[in-house]
Structure formats: C-alpha cells, structure tokens
Amino acid sequence: MSDTPLACTPHDHAHCVSHALAEADQLCARQGVRLTALRRRVLELVWQSHKPLGAYDILAILSEQDGRRAAPPTVYRALDFLLENGLVHRIASLNAFIGCNHPEHPHQGQFLICRDCHTAIEMQEPAIRNAIGEAAAQVGFAVEGETVEVVGLCAPCRRAA
Amino acid sequence: MSDTPLACTPHDHAHCVSHALAEADQLCARQGVRLTALRRRVLELVWQSHKPLGAYDILAILSEQDGRRAAPPTVYRALDFLLENGLVHRIASLNAFIGCNHPEHPHQGQFLICRDCHTAIEMQEPAIRNAIGEAAAQVGFAVEGETVEVVGLCAPCRRAA
DNA sequence: TCAGAATGGGTAACATAATAACGTCTCTCG
DNA sequence: CGAGAGACGTTATTATGTTACCCATTCTGA
C-alpha cells in the first residue's frame, strides 16, 4: 500500500489517474470484489476530472465517447459500488462525485470547493472531525457520518481574480 | 431583538413557531423587504416541522391544506426569499429546508441530523468554523460558505434503541 | 388620479437526479 | 455440466429543481 497521497498537479494528471486506478485494482483484489470494466471506466472518468462529476455527465460520456448504451441505473450502480468501496466520494451540495485520494482506509471526506473553477480539494483534518465530535457529544448525539463541504475561492482563482 | 435563542421543546412548539414568525416579521420590516402571506405561510410550515421539509412537501401542504393552487416555482421563490433573508436553511444532503434558529444575524448552520427520527439540530460551534477556517487558510482557500451536516442518532433515539 | 415600473405569483413545460422492476448474460463453484 | 449469484441492459417512473411567459397588484411620481 502506498504511503504517498494521490495529490497531483495538472501536468502529471495522466500518471495520477493511472496510479489511482492501479491502487483501486489492488484494493478490490484484496477485498475480493470485482472492479469490472464498467466500474473501472467510471472510476477513470471521475478521476480524470478534478471537478466533481454528475451522474448524468458520466452517462453522457459513456454514451458519446464509448458508444456504450447506458441508462441511469448503469451509472448509479457503478457509483454505488465505488462509494461502498471508498473509491469515490459524493458531494451532497453538488449532487456530484469525485475520486477519493485515500481509498486505502474508509473515511468521509471534507472538501474545499472553488466556486470559480469548480475544483474540489479533499481534506482530512482531524481538527474538524474532533470539533464536530465534541459538539455532538455535548448534546448526546452519536456521529455516524459527516458532510463537510466548504465553498469559496481556491488559491489560483484568488490570484486570478 | 431578542437575545433568547428560539430553541424549544415540543410542548411549547406552537409558541415557538409564533415567536419565530414574529421575529421574522420584525426582521423583514427592518430590512425593508416584504414577508408576504405566502412567504410567511411557507416559513410557518417549515417551522412547524422540526424535521427538514422538502419543497414538494410544502407544495403538497399548500395544495391540500390551504387549497391554494401552487406549482413548484411558487414554493421555490418563497424558499429563495427566506434563504436570502436568513430565515431558513437548506440541508444539502436531504434536499430539504428547516427554520433558522438565529435569523437575526447571517450565518450558515451546522446540523446534527438524526437518521431515525429525522430531527435536525442546528449548532453554531465556533470551534468547527475555526477548524475549517484554519484548514482552508493553510492551502490559501478563501471560505465563503460552509456546509456541515452530521448524520447519526440523537440522544432520545439512542436511548430508545 | 393616472401611467409606467417593479414586484409577486400562477401556469406550463422542461431539465436534472435517482429509483423500481424485470430480464438476460456470465462467471464462478460445487 | 448446471445451479445460483452477481453484473448489467432496458423500460418506466418518481423526485427534485429550473425556465419562460403571462397576468395582477402595488408602488411611485408627474
């Protein structure tokens, strides 16, 4: 298992995607689940876009680029599989999906979403998780899952503005 | 302006709703915006439900209970108004709306959502906001809005389980 | 008081997101 | 091989959200 996070800059994006796919292959093999051609392709599409991708965006690509006859259930089933196995995250505020940077251990992501370029940056901040956990504990609430999605301007877009 | 938060227990729910509506009246008057009958009614419906309410739920109540002919745009316009003026919050992970406990100052809520009884508890935890702000600052991200939605079990449902 | 603008709201159609139900194929595994 | 499970295609349907257009009311200022 790689220790290096999968963060990457645009210039090595292709490598980053293939790295993610290879890691997904290994993970699925270890879990005894099948990363079928369709599921792998959907994962590739999600990874190729640093912007969160909607289910119907994926659907369109599968139809137009791949020539595959695909209806919504096809895509949603693949996405469900990828979500269950921690390979992608769902961004609730966008109804969209993005590749997980750290699929090797289960977690829920925290995201910084740029309103200008729509890039989503995944974070894993224990401080945020802890703050939520403490606040919940104060009112006796048992946390099972967190959604943290922050909208704003990313550093490049701030400079460009 | 009242200093008392609008938190309330079920037994004084009617009072709590009327309090919220009265506060909304004052706020809109101060802002010079019009809390029309329709908008006020939608706000009342949202407040009457401690569970987040979907736009189409509101639509159904307006049609069935009030006998008002209402189509989606009617409800969404009212909700947009209430959102803009900080009188309700939108829960992205549920596509639903809930009354804001602290409409007197603009903010984005943090929510604990019970997966069993579907009650949503609004929080205003500076610790969470600060943790997010610090994490964002580290990567040069300018925060404009936060979505914090935590799913789990509320205290009463934990005891009942 | 009246003309015109601004605002609120009704109507229809459309766009996007997600699920249900059923059938077929294929890949194991005994 | 043959039974069962899993994966995927197909059709239809439901849920959620938006757009365009029109009409009525209200506000404003000559």
Image (cartoon, coloured by chain):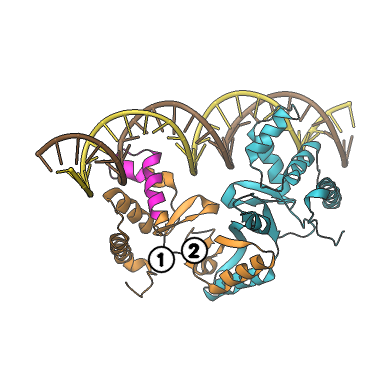
Chain colours: A cyan, B orange, C brown, D yellow
In front of the other: A152 or C20: A152
Callout 2: chain: B
Q: Which residues are magenta?
A: B60-82
C8 up-or-down from D1: above or below: below
Asked if the magenta segment contains residue B93, the reply would be no
Residue depicted at x 33% and y 44%: B62
- Are marks 1 and 2 in one subunit? yes
Tell me which secondary structure the magenta stretch mostly adopts.
helix
Locate the C terminus of chain A and report the quarter of the image it occupies.
bottom right
C29 up-or-down from A130: above or below: above
The residue beneath circle 2 is B109
In front of the other: B52 or C17: C17
Residue depicted at x 34% and y 51%: B42
Q: Which mark is residue B101?
A: 1
Asked if the magenta segment contains residue B62, the reply would be yes
A146 up-or-down from B4: above or below: above
Locate the N terminus of chain A and report the quarter of the image it occupies.
bottom right
